Image (spheres, rainbow, N blue to C red):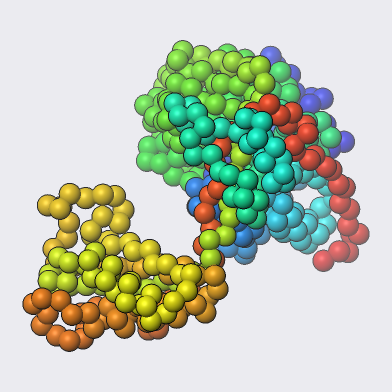
Amino acid sequence: MSAVAKLLASHQPGAERLRVLSASGQLGYGIAAESFERGLERRPHFIGCDMGSIDPGPYYLGSGQMAAPQAMVRRDLELVLCAARALDVPLVIGSAGTAGALPHLQATLMLLRVVAQAHCLSLRVATVASDLPPERLVEALHSGRLRALDEATPGAGLPDETQLRSCSHIVAQCGSHTLMQALRLLPDVLIAGRSCDTAIYAALPMMLGYDPGLALHMAKIIECTSLCCVPGGRDAMLAELGEQDFVLESMNPGLRATPSSVAAHALYEQADPWRVDEPEGTLELHQARYEAVDDRRTRVSGARFCLRASPTLKVEGAARVGARAVLLAGVADPGLIALLPQALTEVDARVHHLLPGPWQMVPHLYGHGAVRPLPASQRSQHELGLVLEFLAPDMEQARTAAAVFKQNLLHFGYPGRLSTGGNLAFAFTPSECDAHDSYRFVLYHLLEGVDPEQVFVVDVQDWAWPENAT
């Protein structure tokens, strides 16, 4: 009997609380082993891991690359897979490989397979693929079923057909009902492509008959492990879910889940702290209550889930902009600092005359407003850091533009200049750094009027190894 089959057959919500262990908020960046072991000692009914996000930017979705180092991904996968099999409980992983597109899902499966074979672990693995072809979005665009996330400005910021077709990868974010569909295949392990963080932890409780509002609220809080604690951390988090409430406890004894810290987590990644939109509906938190059990644990109750008449899927897509070289430098001359934006504009025009072609320079002036806009009175007058991006169709042209720009800026003439050279300081040599391809988001929108079962591809496979496999 598989781990999911065993849980569905043996657990009754009225008989005991469901113990849910959140092992990682971003698998591949190192699971704190000591806290995780404490969680395992509590005999969780299943283990969940979030593995990805769109937060690292469009590069990973566009390129199909993982953000986390492969060696650490394997280390974390080994930790959670071996633990789940030792306890014979389900393991659920969402947003595989960072952005959750097919290359990320395949790479994660490959590493999981390597770990399973190394430990001779026979298991049943379910997968959810979240990819969408551009044609599906083009049709939605023309039929008015693609809209901006900002409902106050419907129709604003919609990409055109050419932009949609330029995307190298497009994914939709699946919800709890899609993961439930995969879990009905009775796997030991479920690995989903792009998915809602909440679905990782809410799907199994909902299948077991727990209240969807409680299950989703619990999932919303524990998907970031101990980030909801004081002080926040990355340690494993245990939730004990009952019929009327759930109790939260960090597996690091030095971290405290307090009513205020847990309630504050409702603001995390949310524009509205009272409503959390899911593909199938909305989690309403107006009646949520947060009560201290002791100085380390909080009991939560009161959330309600309101089902939507038709599912709405968030879709994400990224397209290549070009190759990118980066020039890193610093300026400490107040005279150059005072006119640096003008200097960059003049040098840019000069270098474009010397080096015609479809390249562009994108400046980031640290100390002058690169992180956020600064009023003139708050801008640094004594030192600036320059990060200048050079984007071109290929890396050779991007690197050439950066090198030529550097020399022209280095010797740029301006009133009051004390030296004809050396007005830039370089952190490295060579000072031009290759910085991979550049991608941009084309899609960060909502797709309406779709059947998730016609979007997400659910599959299952059985792995078995001979006893002497290595």
The residue that appears at 24% across and 64% down in the rendered structure is 341
Residue 365 picture quarter: bottom left
Q: Residue furthest bottom?
A: 420
| One can see residue 338 in this view | yes
Image: 413 above or below 123: below
| 50 sits to left or right of 391 | right
Image: 292 above or below 99: above
Q: Position of residue 185 (x, y in %)?
A: 84, 35
Q: Position of residue 48 (x, y in %)?
A: 64, 39
Q: Position of residue 250 (x, y in %)?
A: 49, 37
The residue that appears at 72% across and 52% down in the rendered structure is 102
- Give whichever of 398, 20 is nearer the camera: 398
| 209 sits to left or right of 72 | right
The residue that appears at 47% across and 74% down in the rendered structure is 357
Split into 4 quadrants, where in the image is the C terminus?
Answer: bottom right
- Give whichever of 127, 296 is nearer the camera: 127
The residue that appears at 48% across and 18% down in the rendered structure is 285
Image: 208 above or below 37: above
- Give whichever of 313, 429 is nearer the camera: 313
Q: Position of residue 338 (x, y in %)?
A: 14, 65
Split into 4 quadrants, where in the image is the N terminus?
Answer: top right
| One can see residue 258 in this view | no
Q: Residue furthest right?
A: 466
Residue 265 picture quarter: top left
Residue 215 picture quarter: top right
- Give whichever of 433, 252 is nearer the camera: 433
